[in-house]
Image: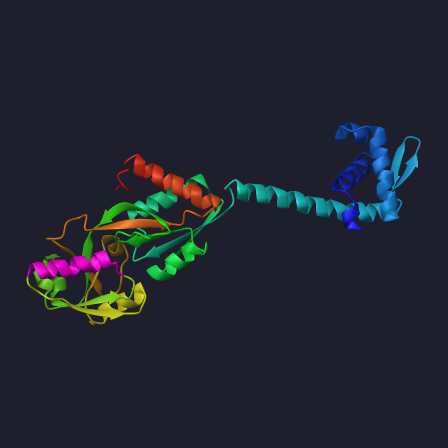
Amino acid sequence: MGYRIPLVALMQAAAVAEHLNFRHAAAALGVSQSGLSQRIKQLEEDLGVLLFERRHRGVTVTEAGERFLRDVAVGIGQLDHAVKMAGMVAGGELGRLRIGLVGVLISHALADLLARFRDSYPRIAVEITDGQRGDMLRQIREGKLDIAFVIGAAIVPDCHSRQLWMEQLVAALPAHHDLAKEQELDWVDLASETFLVRHDGMEPQVLDRVLHRFSERGLQPDIHRFNVGRDTLMRLVAEGYGIALVPESATAIAIPRVEFRNLDDEPPDSIPVTAIWSPFNRNVPHRNFLDMMLRRCRNGAASIRN
């Protein structure tokens, strides 16, 4: 029977129950009294239930009508809430922003961008995960991730990308390593070391830079690849399996038995951090975040630059 009953009839019945008078309810709704009376009568016929007892000076609600209209009020309230929530989601006031990190930590630049977004959109839930580049790109294509930040330059044919800021490469060493006693290191100091690299974790541009730095000095680095996450890689460093090269933002996190050292012959703008996203993503919080990020790039913000 539900498909035969228009929502307006239920809302008008609720108004009559509130005012207990057809004339007053009609005035509040901005409709004619005769039209309102006719619609309520049709509603009662469709239900097979008398909702109101008509009297000379107004109406009273029947017991059946009271029960029916109480349940209807709950349904209308839920519907009103659903409409408001849908509008907020469509308008970007409510929802979620899903961010992936590939070899990137939350640096000052990214933290500042996220803080500004959260201030502007406090009801948007920001979800952050880290993982391998291939998995993050797959999630972007499938619409399960809105944007990913990766170390190094990135050109993905079916995605958009933008280089945002630059980071310096630093060496992560076991705390007991002799080189950890030095304040700064040279590439040549690392010539005899084993470099630990995550599968798909270090961008080719970064690895190429390591190889280039050693080839300039006529050296060949010893590189061991592991299919592990960043935390496990740092644990391997702590246990003395080798050293790792990480972005400078990694030094903001204290890791037991791991020391970080700058390479004094490595420029401060060694590697870029790049954002990658799908041009087909229609998530409104994603578009708002993207607009904010690109606007800051265009304005030449010091913390996010090409």
Q: Residue at x 30, y 69 (%)?
A: 227
Residue 300, given in percent of the width and then of the height, sits at: 27, 36
Q: Is residue 60 above or below residue 110?
A: above
Question: Which color scheme did the rendering employ for the protein?
Answer: rainbow
Q: Is residue 103 above or below residue 279?
A: below
Q: Residue at x 38, y 58 (%)?
A: 136
**Left or right: 256 in relation to 220:** right
Number of marks in the image? 0
Residue 150, given in percent of the width and then of the height, sits at: 31, 54
Residue 134 in sight in this render: yes
Q: Nearer the viewer, residue 110 or 227?
A: 227
Residue found at the far left of this picture = 218
SS majority, magenta: helix
Q: Nearer the viewer, residue 34 or 249?
A: 34
Magenta region includes residue 255: no
**Left or right: 172 in relation to 20:** left
Picture quadrant of residue 253: bottom left
Residue 177, given in percent of the width and then of the height, sits at: 15, 68
Picture quadrant of residue 208: bottom left
Residue 174 in sight in this render: no
Q: Residue at x 84, y 38 (%)?
A: 40
Picture quadrant of residue 195: bottom left
Q: Quadrant of the C terminus?
A: top left
Q: Nearer the viewer, residue 240 or 211?
A: 211
Residue 210, given in percent of the width and then of the height, sits at: 16, 60
Region of the chain picked out in magenta, as a range: 202-217
Q: Is residue 216 above or below residue 92?
A: below
